[in-house]
Image: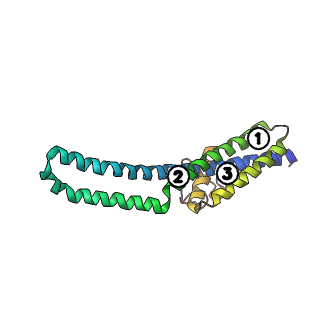
Amino acid sequence: MNDQSVLLKQCSDKRFQAFGTGKIFERRVKRLERRRNWITYLGIAVPLLVGSLGLSFGGNWVKYLAVPAGIAAAIQLILSLWSLVARWDDKYVYAVSAMQAQTKLFNSWDFLAKRQPANLEQRIDDLAAEDQRQETSDIAQGILPEEKRFAMRAALYHYGLVCLACKIQPPSMKASKCDTCGNF
């Protein structure tokens, strides 16, 4: 392999990795967004429901609403506490920024792989430094082995490639039994 083909292979590999890592954080954003929406919904819906039923039906119904409203409020309080302790808001903000950063890296690696500018080697060096900084930040987020397998499957599926472990080209994003591109 000549130097140019080695550089292009590096760009393609990094593009593949950036795509998969972006999918990890995209998935986290969706999951955290759902959780945050439920907490917000319960925090507004429970008081509104109790208040509107109390106003609509008068004081006689309040005694019947007290127990269900108390249970719903306790559930909402427990979820809110869990979200604070687990730092869902911080994780959500990081996941959004990491997804954006990985998309930018993906686009940059893709550009270099497809366009092969005259200063390819210098551009790769600059982009590799940026990639390394992002990878260091992402590692601190505790990416799980299941998420890595999800990322592998997403990238294999996107590019129509065959998994080196199971020798199968993923036909969908449905998890398989493979310990490289499945089991997530």
Q: Nearer the viewer, residue 143 or 181?
A: 143
Q: Which mark is residue 1?
A: none
On screen, residue 129 versus residue 19, left or right, reads right
Picture residue at 14% right of the left edge, 46% below the top? 57
Q: Nearer the viewer, mark 2 or mark 3?
A: 2
Seen from the viewer's position, the closer of residues 181 and 62 is 62
Q: Residue at x 43, y 62 (%)?
A: 82
Mark closest to the chain's N terminus, 1 or 3: 3
> Which residue in the structure is indicated by mark 1?
112
Read off the residue under disc 3.
Answer: 17
Q: For mark 2, what is the residue?
A: 92
Query: Residue 157's x, y, as percent?
Result: 60, 47
User: Sequence order check: which comes first, mark 2 or mark 3?
Assistant: 3
Residue 138 in view here: yes
Q: From mark 2 to mark 3, how far is it between C-alphas?
A: 21 Å
What is the secondary structure assignment of the residue under circle 3? Answer: helix
Residue at (24, 50) in percent of width and height? 50
Q: Which residue is the extreme one toward the right? A: 2
Q: Is residue 120 left or right of residue 97?
A: right
Q: Amino acid at mark 3?
A: Gln
Instruction: Left or right? Give the position of 50 relative to 139.
Output: left
Circle 2 SS class: helix
For badge 1, the amino acid type reads Leu
Q: Amino acid at mark 2?
A: Tyr
Which residue sits at x=36%, y=48%? Answer: 41
Q: Secondary structure at mark 1?
A: helix
- Residue 62, position in %: x, y? 17, 53
Q: Pointers 2 and 3 in contact (CB under 8 A)? A: no
